[in-house]
Image (cartoon, rainbow, N blue to C red):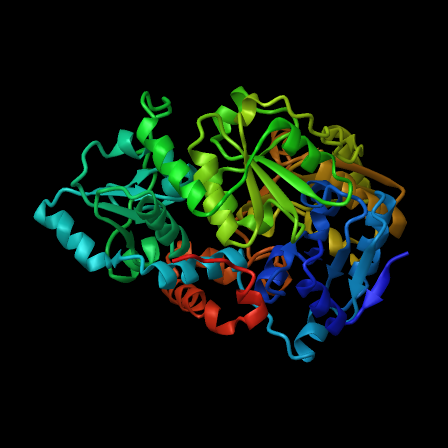
Amino acid sequence: MSASIDPGILQQWLQDKQEIALFDIREAGQFGEGHLFFAVPLPYSRLEIDVLRLAPRKDVRLVLIDDGDVLSGTAARRLEGLGYTRVHVLAGGIEAWAEAGYTVFKGVNVPSKTFGELVEHAYATPHIGADELHAWSKAGKKFALLDGRTVEEHRKMTIPGSVSCPNGELAYRIRTLVDDEETPIVINCAGRTRSILGAQTLRNLNLPNPVVALENGTQGWYLAGLQLEHDSNKRYPDAAPEDLSQERDAAELLRRRFAIPVLTREQAQAWVDDGARTTFVFDVRTESEFADKTLPGAVHAPGGQLIQATDQYLGVRNSRLILLDHEQVRANVVASWLYQLGFEVAVLESGIATALQLPAASPVQSSIALADTADVARQLEQGTALLIDIRSSAAFRREHIAGSHWSIRPRLASLPSLPATAILIAESAAVAALAAQDLREAGVPRIEWAEGLTALKAAGFPVRSYGALPVDADRIDYLFFVHDRHEGNRAAAEQYLAWETALIGQCRHDELSAFRVAG
């Protein structure tokens, strides 16, 4: 049975150095409009799917946060059904936290974003503005421009001429991209954090080239009235570098600078087997390398993204991390940043070649029948079925089946009328099965699902495109000021940059003291 705690108790727990999983179970749009500094987003629409990855130890101290409604109680019941034994609910939800005088933070990845701002101040990371970089380009000055985000983000939009090299790959691949010691290197991202951290990564490795961050990234470029490049395929080569001797030496010096432990197989196994502590084991290499070979049971977490979005990969504060690579470069460099982010982190002596025994993943087993399109058409004609689209609100606005209703798991039970049969349109059977569980409890006897729109469109169901529904107020899964900055919304871009640079000033001492930024 879950217990209720007040904001004062939670604040004490956040400072007692013991493990705690602090989960905000509201949807992405709600979370982004205001949450606790160290809260981890775990939307109720994906609760049982993601919780085992974010908090693998069932007896970890766990706290749920909602809007002060009944959602946390329902979520607590779901988690207890999975075997979690120490589930607590913040009484009054996010409003009670604010009313107690504690800061509520907008945005996403707030700890990592705050960390980036601290790094810029502590290290005095040099930067270059969009106008000056554009002048370099017009003058024909030689420089290397590298995009520290994911390949997918780079392809969507980037600075003209930029080459994709995610931050976690920089230390490993820099000499394949820049083959001399004089060419200036500029690191860009969409805003600030990955530009700063990418540039400072190369500086911390004592790269002889001049290295700077592009101030405010693609947004700064756009706000300066300059054109962005779209659909770029410029990226780092897949082939592994042939000679890594310099890279290993530089990464080893960085590891020693921050006293990152190198664990033997026996030491790492003791961490993994310790039932009183949570240990995450992350392979920080690329997706293709991970798919080709890894340590069974390890989780893929590309190094740059692990630093950028720690709250999307691990849900337990004060836990331990073991990082894997196969070349003793990337794990060391990523560990140096995670240490400064405040984590207890180590690298593995032989990387993915270590005979470490990790627990196998045990995803929640759930099933839901796949709908027959002919039967769906018949039931809709008879008025006995309802099409409920539980894909993202953005996907529904782009395209949906005529007559379908958009909803999301936390709101399914409050639909105006519940049908005899519900047909859920979803991106995956797992998400559909969770929604079906709530609908059954609400009294819907028959529930099936359709995988996206493909089969329904092929069967001749009419489609509506680019509609105005759901209305903005109902889109609890969508955070407007984060997403709209990439859609030509100048005000959103300005608001985002102002938010990012103001983060440090919003933080309490105990929030900032969690970091160990060296400078």
Q: Position of residue 192 (x, y in %)?
A: 38, 57
Is residue 410 visible from the viewing direction of this image?
Answer: yes
Is residue 424 visible from the viewing direction of this image?
Answer: no
Along the viewing direction, whichever of 268 and 303 lies nearer the viewer: 268
Along the viewing direction, whichever of 77 and 37 lies nearer the viewer: 37
Against 69, residue 164 (above or below) is: above
Along the viewing direction, whichever of 34 and 414 lies nearer the viewer: 34
Res 495 quadrant in image: bottom left
Residue for point 57% across, 50% down: 343
Q: Position of residue 387 (x, y in %)?
A: 73, 44
Against 489, residue 435 (above or below) is: above
Q: Is residue 393 toward the left or the right of residue 151 in the image?
A: right
Q: Position of residue 330 (x, y in %)?
A: 44, 35
Residue for point 61% across, 57% down: 470
Q: Position of residue 282 (x, y in %)?
A: 58, 36
Against 454, residue 122 (above or below) is: below
Res 178 quadrant in image: top left
Q: Quadrant of the C terminus?
A: bottom left
Q: How many marks?
A: 0
Q: Is residue 129 toward the left or the right of residue 363 in the image?
A: left
Residue for point 63% across, 65% down: 36
Q: Is residue 168 toward the left or the right of residue 363 in the image?
A: left
Along the viewing direction, whichever of 353 and 41 lies nearer the viewer: 353
Q: Residue furthest left?
A: 139
Q: Quadrant of the N terminus?
A: bottom right
